[in-house]
Image (tube, rainbow, N blue to C red):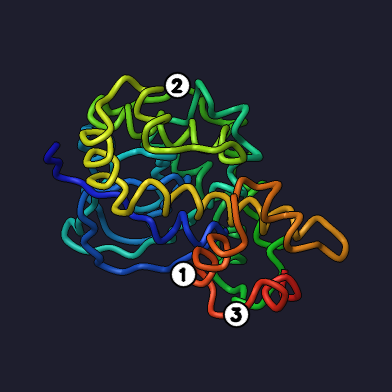
Amino acid sequence: MKQNFFYEAGHDKADTISFHYCENVYTPPHFHRCIEILYVKQGGIDFEVNGEAFHADRDDIVFVHKCGVHALQPAPAYTDYVLIIGPRYSNDFAGIFRTKTLPTHLTDKEYNRKLLPCMSALHELKETDSELIKKGYTDVIIGHLLSHYEKVSVPLMPKIETVVNVLNYIDDHYRDPITLDSISSEFGYNKYYFSRLFNSYVGETLNGYINMIRIRNMMDEAGRTENPNVSELVFSNGFDSMTTFYRSFSKLYDKPPTEVFKDI
């Protein structure tokens, strides 16, 4: 079960649209369930995505499908924009990207430069600015890329295929009772081997991850509900007790649910 890449849980837990300006950062091989788009502003970067190595330079765009294993290093130096689209937002494109995706290396520099105004606008936004504004610019960028570049089949690294399938299964069944016994049986594994496999790639226990997904979806529902009822949302999203919910919630937030709801 050894692997030379790791699951980066931070972006998935945050589940937002985040935008960064980076300079000469070495990034080891990793994967997450966010879509990631990198725009090379200056210099060059050596990439490896799902085992494919290539060099990207000024005005190239690199598109990483969710769960794509990717790494990069300066070649010899670079600056870039990085747009990371959390699972909650990339669900808008789930139907499009289920079996097809964009090519990893997007090299039409003249066309890519048309997207720089959107990238620059995202860069200038403050943390307190509306998520709707971030989502609007993100939709424009994805829409332009889909209209210009021919889609390709979704690549999947065999090494993490089972883990990706498990994560997708949890997305579909998080409202149901899921135990180590039931899910390991579903995927045909001994439960002890399955537990080690899951922990090795995801970096936390099965129950911890499932409860994180339940809270993520609960918060999404709360944001779309007027005067949300905490206990109703807790049980409708798969928790079997308020005690389990509060314990899990405190690992992700430093405020009680009612206060967090006010900020949604």
Quarter occupied by residue 145: top right
Nearer mark to the viewer, of 3 and 2: 3
Nearer mark to the viewer, of 2 and 1: 1
Q: In the rendered image, is residue 107 in sight?
A: no
Question: Residue 140 location, x and y as percent?
Answer: 66, 47
Amino acid type of the residue tagged 2 in the rendering: Val
Q: Quadrant of the N terminus?
A: top left
Quarter occupied by residue 133: bottom right
Q: Which residue is mark 3?
A: 255
Q: Earlier in the sequence, mark 3 or mark 2?
A: 2
Image height check: is 259 above or below 35?
A: below
Q: In the picture provided, is 17 more to the left or to the right than 140? A: left
Which class describes the residues within 10 Å of circle 1: few (<14), some (14-19), or many (20+)? few
Amino acid type of the residue tagged 3 in the rendering: Lys
Amino acid type of the residue tagged 1 in the rendering: Lys
CB atoms of marks 3 and 1 within 8 Å: no
Q: Nearer the viewer, residue 185 or 222?
A: 185
Q: In the rendered image, is residue 66 in sight?
A: yes
- What SS does tag 2 mark? strand
